[in-house]
Image: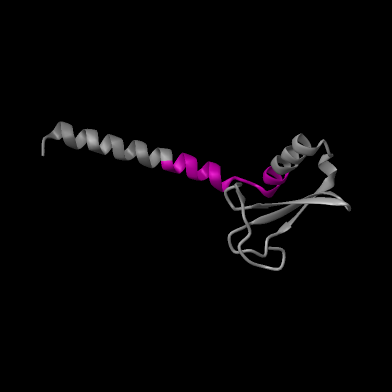
Amino acid sequence: MPRQVLLTVSGLVMMAAAGGLYLGRQQAALSETEVINAIADRYVAETGGAHSDCVARPADDVGAWLVISCGTASSISQYWVDRTGRLVTPTAGPDA
């Protein structure tokens, strides 16, 4: 194999590894507080409610990480969030 091809492939592999490490570290640093605040911001934008209307608990569902409930006694919205911070649909459990 020509030396230039080997150097090019090695360089691309190192760039891919560095990019994966960088993105993995960012994902691993996602905290519960950041997710709860993001969902509370969404709730406030959608309904005009307050951030203090939202509470979170661990999810019973295998595919979810947190359940964030926002609202008042008469109207509650539940947001199921996975470990990457995305909204998911509950698949099982008492709240599904």
14 vs 55, left or right, is left
Segment tinted magenta in the rendering: 20-36
At 57% from the left and 48% from the top, the residue drawn is: 84
Residue closest to the eye, 40 or 23: 40
Relative to 62, is 69 above or below? above
> In the rendered image, which quarter contains the N terminus?
top left
4 vs 39, left or right, is left
54 vs 64, left or right, is right
Q: x and y percent of residue 17 in the render?
A: 37, 42
Residue closest to the eye, 82 or 74: 74
At 62% from the left and 57% from the top, the residue drawn is: 64
71 vs 93, left or right, is right
Location of residue 59 by image quarter: bottom right
Relative to 20, is 68 above or below? below
Is residue 26 covered in magenta?
yes
> In the rendered image, which quarter contains the C terminus?
bottom right
At 47% from the left and 39% from the top, the residue drawn is: 22
Residue extending furthest top? 4
Q: x and y percent of residue 74 in the render?
A: 88, 52
At 59% from the left and 64% from the top, the residue drawn is: 62
Residue extending furthest front? 74
Residue closest to the eye, 96 or 84: 96
Relative to 30, is 95 above or below? below
Residue extending furthest right? 73
Residue closest to the eye, 83 or 6: 83
| Number of numbered discs on residues | 0
Per the picture, the main secondary structure of the magenta-coloured stretch is helix
Q: x and y percent of residue 9 in the render?
A: 23, 37
Is residue 57 covered in magenta?
no
Q: x and y percent of residue 77 in the render?
A: 76, 50
Location of residue 41 by image quarter: top right
